[in-house]
Amino acid sequence: MNDHLLVIFPHPDDEAFGVSGTIAKHTKKGSPVTYICLTLGQMGRNMGNPPFATRESLPLIRQKELENACAAVGIEDLRQFGLRDKTIEFEDEQLLAEQFLSVIDEVKPATIITFYPGYSVHPDHEATGRAVVRAVKSMDESARPELLCVAFARNSEENLGAPHIVTDVSDVFEDKMNCIKAHRSQTQWLVNSVEKDPAMLEWVQKERFWRYPL
């Protein structure tokens, strides 16, 4: 049975918050995971807390953080597209979709996870989600993988309804937190919140996905 998972996000750390527990569950049972990360988050606002990065050093730091985060949840197949942070919305959507299709054809995933277009706030998130949807819709219906999307706009549940899948990842919580902590330049605020706020802890232990209607 094919249970290959393909994760497609624009930035290092996009995988950490809402998907890394699901990834860890996959890899722990021996299922393959491929992660396409489009950029190195060169324009990230955070420089560490306290700051330890500069605008010049941030890309190299985030590259290492991404590698460490992948190791924390068992991702062995990391594909980096080398695009520039905050420019995905200006990429040719058809060309991007074709690049995704090339990987889809290669790894033949059963499931793809990306951002839900219209409900993922950041322009890079939105553009990535749109290109993934375009890629999958271009496939023959019988060959399409399941497309699960992360949505976190304020009106997500109001417009989309409750998530179709809510995964309890408490059994891989340590792996998830190690993934989040690996992105140290960006995530110290979340680590502090999880350690102090029971509501945040509950939020991190559940991962929520909507099936995209193809």
Image (cartoon, grey):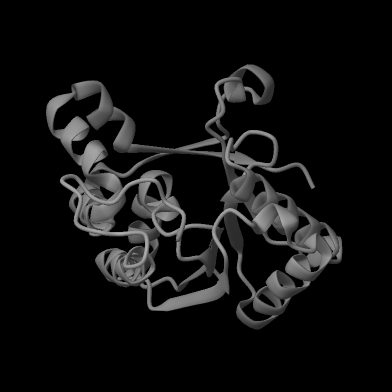
Of residue 195 and residue 44, the one placed in the foreground of this image is 44
Give the residue at x 60% y 59%: 112
Give the residue at x 68% y 21%: 159
Q: Position of residue 68 (x, y in %)?
A: 26, 69
Of residue 146 and residue 41, the one placed in the foreground of this image is 41
Residue extending furthest toward the top = 158
Give the residue at x 26% y 28%: 200
Q: Position of residue 158 (x, y in %)?
A: 63, 17
Of residue 95 and residue 114, the one placed in the foreground of this image is 95
Q: Is residue 25 above or below residue 109?
A: above
Q: Seen in the image, is 6 located left or right of residue 32?
A: right
The quadrant holding residue 138 is: bottom right
The quadrant holding residue 59 is: bottom left
Q: Position of residue 25 (x, y in %)?
A: 34, 58
Please state, as top left, top right, bottom left or bottom right, where the N terminus lies in the image: bottom right
Residue extending furthest toward the bottom = 106
Q: Is residue 36 above or below residue 52?
A: below
Of residue 82 and residue 53, the one placed in the foreground of this image is 53
Q: Seen in the image, is 174 located left or right of residue 160?
A: left
Q: How many marks overall?
A: 0
**Res 148 seen here:** no
Q: Is residue 40 above or below residue 192?
A: below
Give the residue at x 52% y 32%: 152
**Res 194 seen here:** yes
Q: Seen in the image, is 94 located left or right of residue 192?
A: right
Q: Position of residue 105 (x, y in %)?
A: 71, 79
